Structure formats: structure tokens, C-alpha cells
Image (tube, grey):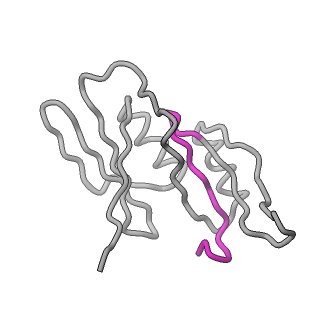
Amino acid sequence: MTKLAHSMIRVLDETASVAFYKAAFDMEIADRLDFDDFTLIYLTAPEGSFELELTVNKSQTEAYDLGNGYGHLAVVVEDLEAARAKVEAAGGAPRDIVDFRPAGERVARFFFVADPDGYQIEVIEAGGRFK
């Protein structure tokens, strides 16, 4: 049996990233491992066991080049409008809510926001396949 454990992203400013994920998505530090050259911070959301691992490379001084291979992280929320307001209050700049209905029937309702390092996060309203 396979269970997803975590996804890792590299961040430049630990304080800014931890504050953003806490304020925007109620994520808390589950563990923090500090080494000479880097620090690993594991964040968890209240409703799940999957973790977001923030890697802070201590010698990194420039923003990371996210390249063209990275897509996005996704989180599911009960109240999309409240989540959008919360992300905005946390200092994020959420994009408009999309009601995705390519063939007339709703597939999903969502918006995107970038974290302090530019990683895209899709915030999806609970329903259908997104429970």
C-alpha cells in the first residue's frame, strides 16, 4: 500500500513562508529539522496527514527559478469565498474565482494564489471529486 507523505518546495524566507501558510491555510509546523546547510520545516493542515516540506537552503540569497516544470499545490476548502478573503487578509493576492464548467456541468470552483516564493496554490471548493 502506498500513502503520499509530503511534497517539498524550496523557499527563500522561512519566516515569510511559515507565516503565509499559517495565516492563509491554518497550516502548523509539525516538525523542524535544522542542519548546517539547510533547514526542513514540515507543515500540516488541520484536516489531513499530508505534509508540505519547506526546504530552506541557508546559502541561497536569490529567489529560486521555478522553471516550467512546476504546476501547483492544491487544497480543498468548504467555503471558497471565506478562504479567498482569508488568503487576501494573509497578504496574498488571490485571482478571481473560476466556476469551471467546460461542458456545462460544474467540474470545480477554485481560485489560484501565489505564495511568497511564487509557488502557485489552487484553492478548490469541496464537492464532487474534491472532498
Spot occupied by residue 115 in the image (x, y as percentages of width and height) = 52, 39
Label count reads 0
Q: Is residue 114 above or below residue 42?
A: above
Quadrant of residue 82 in the image?
A: bottom right
- In front: 12, or 8? 8
> Would residue 76 be found to the left or right of residue 81 on screen?
left
- In front: 67, or 126? 67
Residue 119 falls inside the magenta stretch: yes
- In the image, what residue occupies the spot 35% across and 35% down? 14
> Would residue 60 be found to the left or right of residue 47 on screen?
left
- In the image, what residue occupies the spot 48% across and 33% down? 67
- In the image, what residue occupies the spot 82% across and 73% down? 105
* Dominant secondary structure of the residues highlighted in magenta in the image: loop
- In front: 17, or 111? 111
Q: Residue furthest left?
A: 36
Q: Residue furthest right?
A: 104
Spot occupied by residue 81 in the image (x, y as percentages of width and height) = 73, 57
Q: Is residue 104 above or below residue 6?
A: below
Q: Residue furthest bottom?
A: 1
> Would residue 34 be found to the left or right of residue 23 on screen?
left
Range drawn in magenta: 114-131
Spot occupied by residue 33 in the image (x, y as percentages of width and height) = 19, 46
Quadrant of residue 131 in the image?
A: bottom right
Residue 46 falls inside the magenta stretch: no
- In the image, what residue occupies the spot 63% across and 50% down? 86
Spot occupied by residue 118 in the image (x, y as percentages of width and height) = 53, 34
Q: Quadrant of the N terminus?
A: bottom left
